[in-house]
Amino acid sequence: MRSKHVVTPETVLLDGFQKAGVDVHPVGHAGFEPSDDYDIIHVHHFGKAALKMAASNCKSKFVFTGHNGLIPTGYERNWARQKTFRYTVDKADAFVALSQAEKRFYENYGAAGKVHCIPNGIPSEFFRANIGPGDEIKKQTDQDRFRILYVGQLIDWKGVNFLLEALQQVRLRHNARLRLVYHNAEREREYKQMVQDLGIAEAVEFVGILGPSELAREYYEADLLVLPSFADCLPSVVTEAFLCGTPVVAGGVCGVPEQLDQYGIPIPPGDVPALVAAIETMIREQSRYQALATEMRTYAENKYHPTAMVEGHLALYRHLLSETDSKTGRKSHWTDPLVRMAIAAYWSRGRKGKKGSTP
């Protein structure tokens, strides 16, 4: 995936730190070890590094960004992951939420006072390939065909099966076509069979993974991005679509409604009639949304600018370091040794089960 999809919130943040002259050392989860050598250790995503840092007595300040829509939307079904995620949030010195909705959730989760809202920034230059003179986005309207795009993973909580069901109904009245762009093909075989069973195989194309310039072209050529997810915080694909002047229909969970603003329609996840109605609204109002393309792009560039993300994080780091003149470490908890033992046992088992690979 990384060979194709080089623009992620973590890489954008890392690049911004380096340009700002920050001494930053990027380390993957597999190779991470807690160390007092750093002022700040910022762990992105819930995994080995997050748990190791939470269970350590390391004196560096610990910032955690979960990038996890499963917890605030209540979609996480695994009891152990629920408990260990909460443990990690509790042990962190600061938690970064990506939206106001996520911030409110974690404040009610018991983390009040250490939750900071810093939305992900997306560099617009990766999506400029199809911008015309005067910064005006010009789309070619095809009155006989409506082009729908999905960008994400083919996994259960992304709701692609509901999108396929909705497309079947939309096609009873409109010539709508769907392109699926994805880097995780977990349910690809199932969905390919599903489009056959629904009789819409000729209207659905399984594209697979694309690079940034190819993906920008997909956004630009689409009339609509649909992301029927059950568990997203602030999906980057929504911002990316807006940067290309493409409106969005998405599952109205966590921070998605505030992200959509007036340029998209939030729908209840799993509600096929609502999804059909939203898509048909976009078809009827296609010309209106196309007229908003430049405004849409300006909105995304201003609200989700990488500079704001970088400055927000640096301000948070300065705040944490100003709270004390010396490194004091986090409060220990009786569960810390148990978590350290569980980490060692779990990832040791992973190495034995996957010979020659790094878990």
Image (spheres, helix red, strand yellow):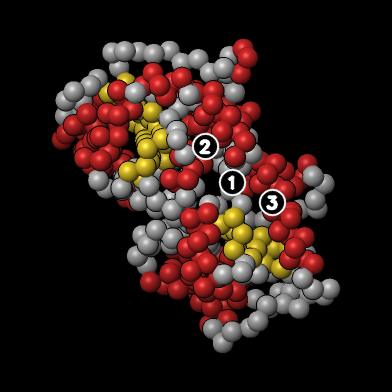
As helix, strand or loop, the secondary structure at mark 1 comes to: loop
Q: Earlier in the sequence, mark 2 or mark 3?
A: 2
Residue 174 tag number: none
Q: CA distance from mark 2 to mark 3?
A: 18 Å
Q: CA distance from mark 1 to mark 3?
A: 10 Å
Residue 226 to residue 157: above or below: above
Few, some or many C-alpha atoms within 10 Å of disc 3 (few <14, some 14-19, many ≥20)?
some
Q: Which residue is mark 3?
A: 312
- CB under 8 Å between callouts 2 and 1? yes
Q: CA distance from mark 2 to mark 1?
A: 9 Å
Question: Is 289 displayed left or right of 301 in the figure?
Answer: left
Q: Position of residue 44 (x, y in %)?
A: 59, 57
The residue at 25%/45% (across/down) is 271
Residue 76 visible, this orientation: yes
The residue at 72%/77% (across/down) is 329
- CB under 8 Å between callouts 2 and 3? no
Question: Is 229 displayed left or right of 321 in the figure?
Answer: left
Q: Position of residue 114 (x, y in %)?
A: 62, 67
Q: Which residue is mark 2?
A: 239
As helix, strand or loop, the secondary structure at mark 3 comes to: helix
Camera-nearest residue between 10 and 339: 10
Q: Which residue is mark 1?
A: 120
